Amino acid sequence: MAVAITKDNFSENVAQGVSLLDFWAPWCGPCKMQLPIVEELSEELKGTATIAKVNVDEQPELASQFGVMSIPTLILFKDGQPVDKLVGLQSKEALKAKIENHL
């Protein structure tokens, strides 16, 4: 299951290794399609990469900090630093390839 990220647990979850954060909201149609893909990746990549989600309604500071203007936005982090940003619905294959490039 994807980790729910808040401003309080952000650092500990993305500081080490590769992390993919899905910025989403419950009212967003494309986000509802992205979420099952994110959950599948979290199972497949358990122990390899951190797969997490950020509810932009509950965490506006994080969304603002990373310049999230539309959702879903997926940001890939390597050792705490953003290395890639994808806006809009992404396929599982595309996300997995991006993650594996940074492992």
Image (cartoon, grey):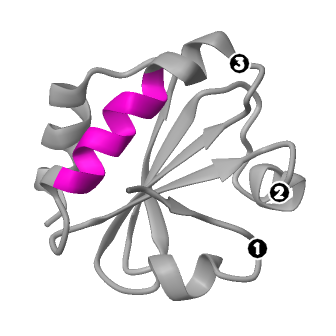
Judged left or right of residue 75, residue 50 is left
- Decide: marks 1, 2 in contact (CB < 8 A)? yes
Q: CA–CA distance between discs 1 and 2?
A: 7 Å
Residue 30 position by quadrant: top right
Q: CA–CA distance between discs 2 and 3?
A: 15 Å
Question: Is residue 36 covered in magenta?
Answer: yes
Residue 57 appears at what percent x and percent y?
86, 43
Q: Amino acid at mark 1?
A: Lys
Q: Secondary structure at mark 1?
A: loop
Q: Amino acid at mark 2?
A: Gln
Residue under pointer 3: 28
Q: Main secondary structure of the magenta part?
A: helix
Magenta segment, which residues? 34-43
Residue 12 appears at what percent x and percent y?
53, 88
Q: Secondary structure at mark 3?
A: loop
- Decide: marks 3, 1 in contact (CB < 8 A)? no
Q: Amino acid at mark 3?
A: Cys
The tag earlier along the polypeptide, 2 or 3, is 3
- The disc at residue 7 is 1
Q: CA–CA distance between discs 3 and 1?
A: 21 Å
Residue 48 appears at what percent x and percent y?
15, 70
Residue under pointer 2: 59
